[in-house]
Image: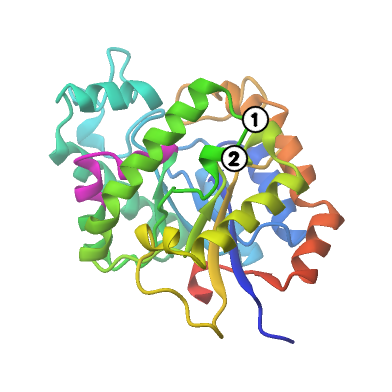
Amino acid sequence: MPQPKVKLVVTGDDFGYCLRRNRGIVDCFQAGAISNVSLLVNASSAKDAADLAKRHHMPIGLHANLSEGLPVCPNLRSGSTLLNDDGFFHGKMGFRKELQNGQLSMSEVELELRAQVKLFCELTGHLPHHMDGHQHVHVLPEVRDIFAQVLSDYGIPFTRVPVEPGLLTCPWLPPTLREFYMQVEKDAKDTVGIFRRHGIRWPDAYLGLTTMGNNMSIANIKRAIGNALDAVSSREGEVTRDCEAPAVDQPITMELMVHPGYPSDPQQGGCGQGPDDFSQSSDRQHELDTLTDPRLLAFYKQERIQLCAFKDF
């Protein structure tokens, strides 16, 4: 086989969210459309997901969750700053608001992250191959320092830095979503130095913000990969690279974040509060159908894009 031009990790996030999402992610993996999964250990079908990963030899990491559902750590299930008045995590934007107002205890963040790593090990029988954050909480101020220390302590080698080349020139994102993504990117860029100091690694390029849900298409995935190749070969990629640029004869590494699956049943799944609109959306099926489209898989082969896992870097 010729040397690949790109080594692409296609990560199915939210593994464990519900039985239907699990089944869709496994179907994607078996079709050769994704190559890696990220497990929500506080989700209702986490054990089923871990068992499926063992059965099908799926590379699996931890999707650390501080924003949706219930904590894993027993000591944080009441009276914790991480919880709202209903006893659940504050939510994607609620977590950010509480953090900005100085209302979150970082010692509690650390307790919960360590509890999630421990539960991951109990479910899978090994440490995560990589660890990232549900709804990108891992790159938020203060949280990122704790997150990096936990990865360093456990020897978890890889994470995600959600800075996508070409985001600003993407015409189809609505203003509110674009604003949120730009803040995620700012937080991620501010996180790079912390991750570097702890010796944590990540791919040369990240994709997935501009190709989520109904924005996913073969054309948009091709566009995102093209933007990433241009960025890595220019000085733009130096800002977020974990080390020096890849050698001329070495493949460029990328991660594509995806959320495929069969949409959740309204009565089943979630992380303690039932499934959210995101998981019940037909967008999950749309992503599955796009990722498994033979034309996309043929494009990967034609362009010498090899799907792989983090351990293959």
Q: Which label was assigned to residue 210?
A: 2
Q: Residue at x 63, y 32 (%)?
A: 171
Q: Is residue 202 left or right of residue 25?
A: left
Q: Position of residue 77 (x, y in %)?
A: 26, 28
Magenta-drawn segment: 135-147
Above or below residue 217? Residue 29 is below
Residue 15 in view: no
User: Extreme top residue here?
Assistant: 85
Taken as a whole, is the magenta stretch helix, strand or loop? Answer: helix
**What kind of element bears circle 1?**
loop
Q: Residue at x 78, y 70 (%)?
A: 301
Above or below residue 150? Residue 274 is above
Q: Which label was assigned to residue 172?
A: 1
Q: Is residue 130 left or right of residue 35?
A: left
Q: Residue at x 54, y 82 (%)?
A: 250
Identify the image quadrant of residue 133.
top left
Q: Is residue 185 left or right of residue 37?
A: left
Do the residues bearing badges 2 and 1 touch, measured as CB atoms within 8 Å? yes
Q: Position of residue 169 (x, y in %)?
A: 57, 39
Q: Amino acid at mark 2?
A: Thr
Residue 137 in view: yes
